[in-house]
Amino acid sequence: MIRFILGALILLTGTPALSQPLIIAHRGASGERPEHTRTAYELAVEQGADVIEPDLVLTRDGVFVDRHENEIGGTTDVERHPEFADRKTTKVVDGVETTGWFTEDFTLAELKTLRARERLPAFRPGGAAFDGQEPILTFGEVVAIARAASARTGRTIAVAPELKHPTYFAGIGLPMEDAFVAELERLGLTGADAPVIVQCFEVGPLERLSKRIDAPLAQLVSGAGGPADRPGLTYAEMITPEGLKTMAAYAAWVAPEMTLVLPRDAEGRSTAPSALVADAHAAGLKVVVWTVRAENAFLPAEHRRGEGLADHGDMAAYVRALAETGVDAIFSDFPGLARAGL
């Protein structure tokens, strides 16, 4: 119990890191239940997660809902609803052409008629067994789940919302920032001690939010490319010592893809840690890595077990290796296994 309470205090107050990083349940216990569902979040809390993560996109009527992407053909049963067949379309989101059904073409009431399904059924048939059982959640409903879990367990369960594609949404007349600040204010999550970490791959939204709320912000960083709203900037430039100092002016966390901390060689084996954690800490930033998964397909070669890509490797050992680099938090689809590795 003391470990969990102290972990929450680190998150809220910015005090120095413990030897054990926080565990952030990536879309809930999404390795075992369809992602972004109530059962995925509640299972994650039972397994010891400190934080639960919702990805946020907007509906046509401006409500934040919890989906991995605004395209929902892969995560809901929308294709089984003939009344929505004519809403299938092709759009370009952040330069990527995608065909499917998009949240911005539905009202919240319409989306609530859909049910979630497993996004990776070939890897996670156990999760697929729960297809069709649960509705799409709003951001407010996820916060309510976290608060109920906090009351039930006696430890603070924080939330880590990710704003998805804010520049795209602004371009179609659904700007996120004002609506998001209003929602945080309604939920009482704007303070420096609020149990929340706001994430985004884009830079501008975080810079502007830093001037409007005191809640901690996390700059997501991919292993390639750059922010959609800064075409002249690469993620590689952002994680240089100078880039991290610039980031620290608006963010409390840097959130790199895990191989930026533990790189891999040509055979897929982990090499020596990079300087990223030390450089980030020197700039005053905490570090949270994403996303640790149990399947061989996502693990470095030295932690794979068995022959199949969907077979589970030694994820706990990989979590320990990441923890030894000094990271402050770890995103995982399997929060129970991640906790076991610490």
Image (spheres, rainbow, N blue to C red):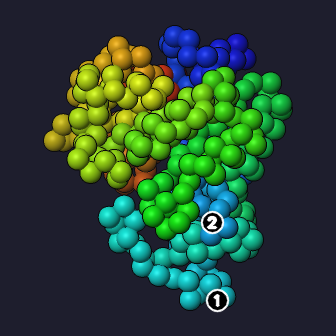
Q: Is residue 43 visible?
A: no
Of residue 169 and residue 329, the one placed in the foreground of this image is 169
Q: Quadrant of the N terminus?
A: top right
Query: Where's residue 286, x and y in %?
Result: 45, 22
Q: Is residue 238 left or right of residue 2?
A: left
Secondary structure beneath label 2: loop
Query: Where's residue 269, x and y in %?
Result: 24, 36
Q: Is residue 196 visible?
A: yes
Disc tally is 2
As displayed, is residue 82 above or below residue 135?
below
Query: Where's residue 213, x and y in %?
Result: 60, 33
Amino acid type at mark 2? Thr
As displayed, is residue 239 above or below residue 178?
above
Q: Is residue 260 left or right of residue 316?
A: left
Amino acid type at mark 1? Pro
**In percent of the image, x 66 and y 33: which residue is there?**
190
Query: Where's residue 186, x and y in %?
Result: 76, 43
User: What residue sits right under mark 1 in the picture?
Assistant: 82
**In percent of the image, x 58 and y 75: which residue is there?**
105
Q: CA distance from mark 2 to mark 1?
A: 20 Å
Q: Is residue 284 left or right of residue 151?
A: left
Secondary structure beneath label 1: helix
Report crowding for label 2: few under 14, some 14 to 19, many 20 or more residues within 10 A (C-alpha).
many
**In percent of the image, x 53 and y 75: which residue is there?**
101
**In percent of the image, x 49 and y 39: which residue is there?**
208
As displayed, is residue 262 above or below residue 54?
above
Q: Are marks 2 and 1 in contact (CB under 8 Å)?
A: no
User: What residue sits right under mark 2 in the picture?
Assistant: 59
Name which of mark 2 and mark 1 comes first in the sequence.
Answer: 2
Query: Which mark is nearer the camera, 2 or 1?
Result: 2
Query: Which residue is most to the left?
Result: 266
